[in-house]
Image (cartoon, rainbow, N blue to C red):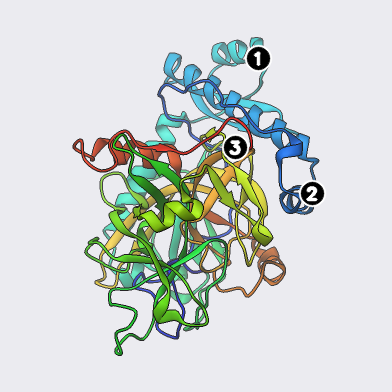
Amino acid sequence: MRKLGARRATVRAAHAVSVGFAAAVLLAPVFGAGAVSAAPQQLSVGDLPAEMIDAISRDLHMTPQQYLDRAVAAQDLRSYANDFRADHPDAFAGAWLTPEGKGVIAVTNADAQRLAAADGYQTKIAPISANGLEGALLQLSQWVASLPREIAAPISSIAIDALNSQLILNVANTPTGHMLNLPTLIATIKVVLSPGGGGAVEYRPMGGDTYISSTKDLHDATLRGVDVCSFGFNSTDAAGNALNISAGHCNPRTDGGPASVYVPNVRDLPNSVEVGQFAKTVLGGPAALDYSVIKLNERAVNAGMDRPRVRGANGTTLTVTGIADPVTGAPVCKTGQSSTFTCGFVSADRVETQLFTAEGVSKTIRGFADSACTLGGDSGGAIITGTLALGITSGSNAADAPNCNEANTQLAPYGGTASLGVGIRSILADIEANSAGGLGSGITVRTAPRAS
């Protein structure tokens, strides 16, 4: 599998080394404590684009109303689980939605089980608490980060599987992967072999609202390639700056410095229109996130990038009505122009993977997993649940596929397509915490209660 990084419009590869996120089994979440506001208003079925309705039926086998209702139920479960964990930190062991949409609370003792059951939830007794699983994940993640690059490369991701009270370690089915010795100090580890990565691939633009960027001026005769990614959520800060949140690895400047962002003119690439610059880039670090903040210029604002919308297939748009948290079992849809709307379910709300930069530096990226098909060039694009902003795309196991039909066929034996998303709430909190009152201070995703 490959990390879905910024893609090159020519044969030269992007700066991030390909590190895959393997297809996931149904993994359960580990909820973090913290205040959660009342669930934002969802749009009605009549406000959903026709192409999105088709994707919901095709990928989720749901009606549009069932999709919206399931998204609301997931956020309600998230709120309850946060409160339950805060009150019973040693007993809480996870929460998820069943395939039928029923909320489940996992606990470690009968007393906690009776409390959750009395509140109307299905329950399950687990041998390990959420705190215990998170501690094991931290140990395993630190061990992987300490490995030499050539040894760590086959390890594509680590996820928490609260349904079975274990960690899932995805390892490429390669000789190096077979020889990997797991640390004996960590128990409850399951190793899943995934297909090994292929050779060099010529990447081309795919996905939704694409943008291109480069370390050089587009008219520079020595330019041999541009990075291709997707815009995420339009945002603004307290100073009124027009911003867009995308993926951190999409910035071609490996030092995180500013680089121009263009809407591509495929017929005349050097004369593509500049719409902004990377103003902030985070890749790994203390927060273990993968995001960028693009400061949009007046031309971008005049073109409509000050609106609370994400674009899907054939120019259709969806109004974003609020923000949400990942919940296992929650339905999600991803925007895209080439791959159109594709939908799936959150399969794990806590996943960690290692990304290696061109300098060989290991970066830990933390996010959530979902089963929506995501193609090369979709990095940074918007992931929604119902009509709420959930996160931006960071990685995929289908990055090299020419289309989702082929991706679904090739990856079916390994559990299907899987993508790594970075939660929007975590991104907003990190931007705010490090803004120092400057750009990004008071940042919010642009939202509207109903379609305009």
Residue marked by disc 2: 57
Residue marked by disc 3: 163
Q: Tell me the quarter of the image containing the C terminus.
A: top right
Nearest the viewer among 171 and 210 is 210
Please identify the residue farthest to the bottom as the structure is shown.
221
Can you tell which mark lies on residue 117?
1
SS for tag 1?
helix
Q: CA distance from mark 1 to mark 3?
A: 17 Å
SS for tag 2?
helix
Comes first in the chain, label 3 or label 2: 2
Foreground: disc 2 or disc 1: 2
Residue 308 at x, y = what percent? Answer: 52, 42
Q: CA distance from mark 3 to mark 2?
A: 27 Å
> Which residue does the image show at 46% across and 76% down from the upper left?
175
Please identify the residue farthest to the left as the structure is shown.
436
- Residue 96 in which image quadrant: top right
Q: Label 1 is placed on what type of residue?
A: Ala
Are the two marked residues, 2 and 1, in contact with CB atoms closer than 8 angstroms? Answer: no
SS for tag 3?
loop
- Residue 119 in which image quadrant: top right
Left or right: where does residue 395 sit relative to residue 195? left
76 w.r.t. 336: above or below: above
Residue 375 at x, y = what percent? Answer: 57, 66
Can you tell which mark lies on residue 442?
none
Residue 340 at x, y = what percent? Answer: 66, 60
> Which residue does the image show at 80% across and 47% down from the upper left?
61
Foreground: disc 3 or disc 2: 2
101 w.r.t. 423: above or below: above
